[in-house]
Amino acid sequence: MSDRYPWLTAVLSLTVLAIALGGPKSAEAKTPDSLKYWILFEDRGAGEPEDLTAEISERALERRIRRGLDAAATADFSVSTNYIRSLSESGVQHRVVSRWLNGVSAYLTPTQLNEVRDLPFVRVVRPVGSSYVARTTPALDLTDRSVASPLFSPSASMNYGPSVTQLSVANAIPPLEAGYNGTGVRLGFLDTTYDGFSHPAFTALRDDERLIEVRDFTGLPQSNTHGRSVASIAIGNQPGELVGPAHGVEVLAATTEYAPTETNQEEDNFVAGMEWLEAMGADVVNVSLGYTTFDEGQNSYTIADLDGDTGITTVAADIAASLGVVVVTSAGNWVSFGCGSPAECWYRIGTPADGDSVVAVGAVDATGTRGYFSSYGPTADGRIKPDVSAMGVSVYHAQSSTGYGSGSGTSFSAPMVSGVVCQMLQANPGLKPMQVLDILRQSANQSQNPDNSLGWGVINAEIAVAAAIAVSTENETPPASFAVSAYPNPFDRHVTFRFRTITPGRASVRVFDLLGRQVGPPQERDVHSGEHAIIWHGDTLSSGVYVYVLETPDGTGTGRLVHL
């Protein structure tokens, strides 16, 4: 393997150095006048031996190769032990080491801050932020808000129970009925605790031994099981109660959020957890967390920081995407901070939702109407956010040790999208993160008119999965013998049919919807022996799946088209 991929000789023995430590290394590590900072280094150090403790998994390496990404990224190189030692000798005790960021986090007094900034191997020193959980809070009182009927009322062979509504809003039941439940895909979570995945919604996950590992990066006991609720929406499987769109996946779970407090540690934990999930071979990561405003005395982000490059968690999420991981994150709940109006509080998306390579998810109710709490875009540099939306109002999920209930928040819309992404990757494991993002956007219900409220709109899993299948045929070269090549597929304005004939005569293309109704006029032309192309225009079609029939003197070709 190393002969074919020279970079593997280094990568195979590289480690995930981002290990969240349970507390300060000494009593002097945190003092009343100290704040936490990230200390990022200029380089990896010269002439040092590798100091490694864990490997990048074979699955992670295969994922990078399969998705055509640069697995030789410098993010895989270890952090300089000499630099860390120099900090320690000067009295700076590090908390987390990140190979992706090439640096460490540490508490610094004002005097230490100035000294560290002057070190020749330090590139920049920047404050560490803290997090909120993008979940329902007492501020999200939905008792006076009626929930209307779902957008769809599908017939189904499986008993989806009350979860039928949230699945139907995302149109995720048709792929489920066709067997797309995330089988073969590895889904990771960054959240609070998961209660050991002991809830009945996860029985099949445990029985099938698809729960790969759960790791706690906080080192602190807590009773908050927001992670369990979030995970159940994506992967739960108790027919008659709750079925998630990706109930067939393998699961990794990282506890990075300590819910009782809002401290600086959560952003550290996030980086450590994301590096671990990527190294363990996660294909998709769900993030129902956000990082914006912080407790008194800590460093906060500003709206100007939402540029896709400033937030440490945004940087980590974008690096994960560059390594082939699809990162799905909640847009945020602007009223969850207990403030009364947009003028009084942070109503924008947070980090890492501002990342240009992540899928930021807003919330709607069962009618497709925006949830009043769902955070708005744009980013500081003017990009539309969120990207897409899913049901986040009165979402059915695992609650208590064995029961179920409903809750609201963009943290409950994100796992539905994560689940649909797993369906897409089951259908086409080679999809790159940006292809996934593009398909989700273009198949959503307001793809032609995106805004900073719902992004490109409510996702449509049926079209997204069909597009995932079809995109592998894009730019396909027609074979020499009679066959039809339709490209691009998915298509926006028009699709080109290429084919070869031997017998002269008449050729025609007709397109039908899934109810068998012909859409648009047929395209016909006289053909001779040789290669031909017929362009069919579908500008006025609604987004969806269609069937084409190409008739020639030598035979008939059929196939599916996806219109975005």
Image: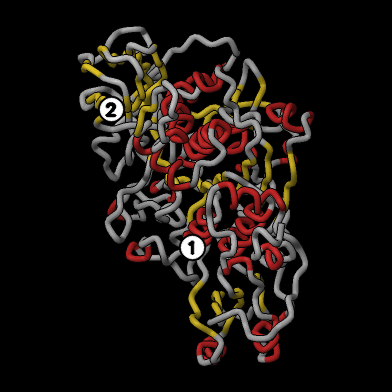
Q: Quadrant of residue 15?
A: bottom right
Name above or below for residue 130 compared with residue 181.
below
The answer to whether residue 243 is left or right of residue 379 is: right
Residue pictured at 34% horizontal, 36% vertical: 442
Q: Secondary structure at mark 2?
A: strand
Q: Residue 517's x, y, as percent?
A: 30, 8
Query: Which quarter of the rendering shows the C terminus?
Result: top left
Name above or below for residue 28 compared with residue 304.
below
Q: Which residue is mark 2?
A: 533
Would residue 190 be seen by someone viewing this image from the given angle?
A: no
Front disc: 1 or 2? 2
Of 548 and 318, the residue lying toward us: 548
Residue pictured at 61% horizontal, 75% vertical: 104
Count of marks, rendered view = 2
**How far apart are the two marked residues, 1 and 2, measured between alpha carbons?**
45 Å
The answer to whether residue 269 is left or right of residue 214 is: left
Q: Residue 450's x, y, as percent?
A: 27, 40
Give me the disc on residue 315: 1
Q: Secondary structure at mark 1?
A: helix
Q: Residue 452's x, y, as percent?
A: 29, 45
Give me the disc on residue 88: none
Residue pictured at 44% horizontal, 29% vertical: 479
Q: Residues within 10 Å of mark 2 (few under 14, many from 20)?
A: some
